[in-house]
Image: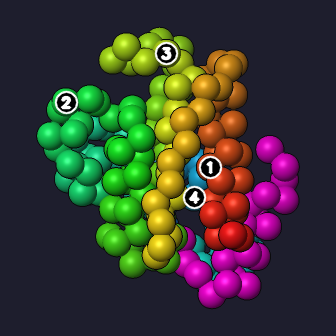
Amino acid sequence: MSDDLPARFITALVDRGLTVAVAESLTGGMVVADLVSIAGASAVVRGGIVAYATDLKATLLGVDADLLAAGGPIQSLVAEQMAQGIRHKLGADVGIATTGVAGPDPQDGHPPGEVWIAVATPTEVRSMRLELGGGRAAIRRETVKRVLEFALERISE
């Protein structure tokens, strides 16, 4: 990852007067950890929730339980609802979410490296499917990079 990506994202939030909250599954807190490693992050980072277990996506983040029961946690609408849920739950302007399979084994018919990321702002909710290669650590690290890039693009438009 570009070492300055978290700093650029924090700076962009500060410049725009926005706050952020993060809902993570496969990244297990890595997104928030990267953000709070930047001096001054406390001005814009509201917090994060690691909802690793599927049921927590519903109970903590407000993801539709029927959606989870019907299609599991690895789908665009789940990522979008996670981003919206964290945004509202923690009172942030921007919500970021990650869900997917880090591996090494498939999950519910989804291969390692299938990841959904999402960003919710006051005006839109967008998600993106990623197909990442490498081992578990590489997939998680690349997910962090890609979600921060995606979030930076969303707030810079």
Near-viewer residue (75 or 53): 75
Q: Earlier in the sequence, mark 2 or mark 4?
A: 4
User: Counting residues from the N terminus, which is met first, the one under dot 4 or under dot 1?
Assistant: 4
> Of callouts 3 and 2, which one flags the residue occurring earlier in the amino acid sequence?
2
> Which residue position holds label 1?
147
Q: Which residues are magenta?
A: 1-20
Direction left: furthest residue: 66
Disc 2 and disc 4: Cα gap in Å?
Answer: 29 Å
Q: Nearer the viewer, mark 4 or mark 3?
A: 3
Q: Residue at x 70, y 61 (%)?
A: 153
Q: Name which of mark 4 and mark 3 comes first in the sequence.
A: 4
Q: Secondary structure at mark 4?
A: helix
Name which residue lies at 41% across and 46% down. 79
Secondary structure mainly formed by the magenta segment: helix
Does the magenta segment cover residue 45?
A: no
Contact between labelled residues 3 and 4, with CB atoms less than 8 Å apart:
no
Q: Would you name the residue on which mark 2 appears?
A: 70
Q: Are marks 1 and 3 in contact (CB under 8 Å)?
A: no
Give the position of the N terminus as an image quadrant: top right
Q: CA distance from mark 4 to mark 3?
A: 25 Å
Relative vertical location of residue 123 with respect to residue 117 in this rendering, above or below: below
Amino acid type for the residue under numbered disc 2:
Ala
SS at circle 2: helix
Q: Which residue matches tag 3?
A: 111
Q: Nearer the viewer, mark 2 or mark 1?
A: 2
Q: Residues within 10 Å of mark 2 (few under 14, many from 20)?
A: few
Of 139 and 80, which appears nearest the observer? 80
Q: Amino acid at mark 1?
A: Val
Q: Earlier in the sequence, mark 1 or mark 3?
A: 3
Disc ID at residue 32:
4
| Residue for point 33% across, 62% down | 85
First of labels 2, 1 by sequence position = 2
